[in-house]
Amino acid sequence: MTAATRPSDRYLELVCPAGTPAALRAAVDAGADTVYCGFRDCTNARNYPGLNFDVDELREGVAYAHARDRRVLVAINTFPRAGDAGPWHRAVDQAAAAGADAVILADIGVLDYATRRQPGLRRHLSVQASAANGPSLAFYREHFDVKRVVLPRVLSVADVAQIVAESRLEIEVFAFGSVGPMSEGRCFLSSYFTGLSPTSEGACAPASHVEYLERDGRMFSTLGKVTLNSFARGEPAAYPTPCKGRYVTHGRASYLFEEPVALNAISILPELKAAGVTALKIEGRQRSRAYVAQIVGRFRDVLDALARGDAMPQGLGDLKGEAEGGRETFGAYHKGWR
Amino acid sequence: MNAVSPPRLTLGPLLLHWSAEKRRDFYYRIADEAPIDTVYLGEVVCSKREPAAAAYFDRVAARLRAAGKRIVISTLALVTSKREIGHIRELAAAGAMLEANDVATVQLLAGAPYVAGPHINVFNEGTRDFLARRGAARIVLPVELSTASIRLIARGAGATEIEIQAFGRQTLSVAMRCYHARSHNLTKDHCQIVCGLDADGLTASTIDGREVLKINGTQTQTFEYGVLLPQLASLRDAGVTHLRLAPQDIDMVRVADLYARTLTGAVAADEALAELRLVTGDVPYANGFALGRAGAAWSAVPTA
Amino acid sequence: MTLTTVDGAHPAPLRPATPIPTADSRTPSALLRLAATALPRALIARLAGIMVRSLGGSHPKLLRDLEHAAPARIHVLPTDLPYGFALDIGRMPLALTVIERDAGGSDAAVAASVATLIDLLEGRIDGDTLFFRRDLSIAGSTAAIVELRNVLDREEIALSAELARPLGRFGRPARGLARRLDRLVERAGARVAALHRTLHPSQDADRDTADLLDQCRTEIAALTSRLGKLEARQKRRDEARA
C-alpha cells in the first residue's frame, strides 16, 4: 500500500472516484489522498444502477479511509426537483453523521440548507455548479463559506491561474477521465432525448435508454431511440452520451461536440501546480475498481516523484489503454481546444 | 400572486446572430406592433457578437421604451474572461435591469434587483427563496422543468415573478467551444463569426438522417420550436406571471399576437396551433419538457 | 436478439483445436480459463450451481443486491466456448444455468472471451475499457448489464475460492485438486508459449499440443468424478443438517 502524503508535504492532493465500497478501498490502497463517492439515489450525478453507497457502506468507507489517514467526500451534486428536496437534505445530514470530511454540492438551495443545518460540515462546490470565474466563486464563498471549488473543464491553465489568484479558495481541477464539452449542470441534451434529467436525476445517458444494435457490420449506439453513433468493426467506441455522438452538418458526419477521448493532464501537473491548484480530480465513479487502482496508482507514482523534486517520470503518462475512444487530450487546458 | 390576471408576454434575448441592420428592423417592428411587455436585449451566447447588438442599441432601446415596453439587459451564460466580467460590471454600475445568466452577474449586482435568467439553475423552492431574498425580482425558469415543477415553484413565489419560455427553440447546452466554428473546421478564437451564416441556426442531423439539433454558436438547441400553447391555461392557473417568446427568424409579431389572443381566450388553443403553423412553416414542435417527458416529445393535448 | 461482433484486439498467433490460455498461467484464473474452455459442459453446469449457492455464504450482501436488482435474464456468451450461461437476477433464488449459444428469451446479452469475462468478474479489468476497445459487446437491456457489472464490482470476488468454499471441510481436497490443475495449466501454458516463439509450428509441436490436451482431458475426467463425489457428499451433509 502506498502511504498518503501529509497535506503539508503534498505536491497536489489526489482526489479519486469510488462508485462502490470495493473501489473506495482500491483507491485508498493505490494511494488516493481523498476519495469521493455518492449515495445510491438521485442525489448525485452518477446515479447508475448498482452503483454507489448506502449509509452503512459510507460509514465503513469513511472508517477505512480515516484509519489510513485519508479523507472521504460525498457528492450531493444534483439539483432537487421542486417539492422533493427531502432526499438531498437527508443526504447532507447522513454524510455528516457518517463522518464524511466534506460534501460536494451544486444546488443553491442545498448549499443554503447545508450551511444552516450542518455548519460544521465542510462544503465544496461541485463542477455541476459550473462556476468558472472570480465573481461566481466569490458568490459561493460569501454566502455558503465553501472552502473549495471544482472548476469546470472549460478553462485554460492561464484561466485557472487567474481564478486561483483571485478567489482565495482551494481549487480542484480535473486531471483524468471523460471530457464533457458542455457547461456542466446546465446540459439538457440527455433529457431532451430520454426525459430523464442528468441535472436532477443524476444520470446522463441513462442505461435504461441506451441500446446497441448491429447493422451492416457496424455497431450502432442509440439513446432514447435516437442514433448517436456507429462504429466499424474494431473502431474504438465512445460513451453513448449526446455530446459524444456523430452528427451531420454541411452534409458531413463528424464529432461535432467532442471526439471520444479522455482528458489526461498527467504530463502538465507541474503547470497546474504552478497555477496554484490544490487538488486533482480523477473522473470515473462509473468505472470499476480495476480502473481506479490503475489510474490512481499511476498518478500516485508521478506525484511522489514530483514531490521529491525529481523530473517528470518518463513513460508513466500514457493511459490511452483505459481512455474513452483509446485517445487522450489536454482538453481546455491548452487554448487550441476551443 | 395574481392568478386571475393572465401572464404577460416577454420577448427573450436574441440568441441567434443577425446583422446590426436586421436586428434594428426586427426590434423596431416589435416596438411598433407586438403585444409584448418586456423585451430582453443583450448578448447571452458569445461576446464576439456584441458589436452587432451595440450598433443600434440606443435607438432600439429608445423606440421600445417609447412604445411602453420594459427593457432588461441579458448577460452571458458562460462568463470566463476579464473583459466579459468588466462588461457586466459596467452594466451593473449603470443601473440597468439585468438578466443574470451566470452567478457572476448576481454577485456583481450586490443585492440590486435583477432577473434570474434561465441559465441559472432554479429547480426548486430552496433556490428560488435564496435568490428572491437577494434581489431576484423575477426568475426565468430553466426550459427543462415540467409544468408540475413550474406549478410548485410559482406557487409560494410571493412577490417574485415567474417566467418560462413558451415559444421558440429551447437551449439544451452552452459551452466554451463554438460548434458553429467546429462545423466549418474553425476554432472559437478564429471563428470568422460563421454563426451569422445561419439566421435560424444550423441543423445537425443524426448519421441516419434525422434532424435533431440546432447549433447556434456555443449553444445547442432543440431542432423543434418549443411550443407551450397547450400548456398556457395550466401555466396561467399556476401563477406564472410572464411567458417568454424566443426570437426566431419568422414573423415574431404574429407569434406574439397569437399567444396574446390565446391568453385572453379570444382564440382556442387548438385554433391557435393551426394558425401558428402558418407562421412557422414545417418546423416541428416540441413540449416534452413541460409534459415531463423527453424534451423532443410533442403533444397538442391541453395540459390540465 | 442481435449481438454485436466481438473483435479481439490481438488474435492469438496459434490456435490449438481446444484453445488453451497461455497468459499469466500462475494465477488461479488461469485454472478457471482452462476449466471453462476444457471441462465438460455438464460439470460446468454443476459448478455454476455450486458457485451461486456459495455466494450467499461468502458475499451475502452481493447476493442480496443481485436478488434485488431489476429482474432480468442475462445471457453471458463466452466467444470461445460452444455454449453460454443464463443468469437470472432480480429473483430469489438467483439462477445460473448453462444454455445453447443461440438460446432465446434473454433480456440482455454480453459477449467476450472466457479470459475477459473472468477478469471482469474478478475485478481485474474495467468494463468500460473493454467496451471502448470493443473487446466486449452487449445487446438488449443495457441497464441490466450495467447493473450486473456494477453490483459484481462492489466486492472482491475470487472465483476459485467461490468454487472451493462450498465444499466445506472437503474444500481442502478441492483446493488440492485446484493446485494440481494449476500446475498442469502452468506446464501447458509454458509449452504453448514456447510454441508461439517458434513462429512456425512443426508437426512435433502439433504432437506436443495433442499430448498436452490428452493429458488435460485425463486429469479433467478425474477431477470431474472427484468433484461429483464431493458435491454429493456435501449435499447429503446439508440434508442431514436440515
Image (cartoon, rainbow, N blue to C red):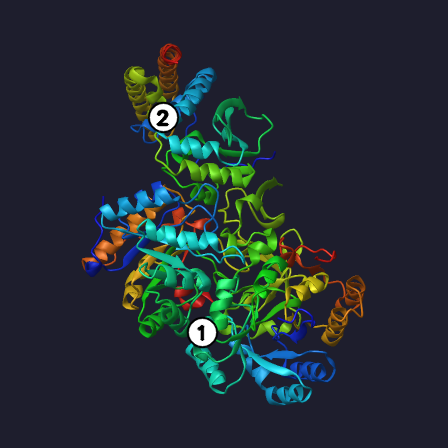
Measured as percent of width and height from the top left, residue C187 is found at 30, 22
Left or right relative to B145: residue C128: left
Q: Is residue C13 visible?
A: no
Which chain is indicated by disc 1? B
Residue under label 1:
B104
Please, what is the three-letter code of the amino acid marked with disc 1? Ala
* Residue C57 circle label: 2
- Foreground pick, B184 / A237: A237
Q: Which chain's residue wears label 2?
A: C
Q: Residues within 10 Å of mark 1 (few under 14, many from 20)?
A: many
Residue B241 in the image: state x and y as whole percent: 63, 71
Is A200 located above or below residue B169 in the figure?
Answer: above
Q: Quadrant of residue B141?
A: bottom right
B24 to the left or right of B140: right
In this view, A156 is above or below A85: below
Q: Is residue B57 above or below residue A83?
A: below
Q: Quadrant of residue A197?
A: bottom right
Q: CA distance from mark 1 to mark 2?
A: 55 Å
Residue drawn where x is 66% and y is 83% of the image: B69
Q: Going by the image, does C107 lie left or right of A172?
A: right
Q: Same chain for marks 1 and 2?
A: no
Q: Are marks 1 and 2 in contact (CB under 8 Å)?
A: no
Out of B96 and C225, give the one closest to the viewer. Answer: B96
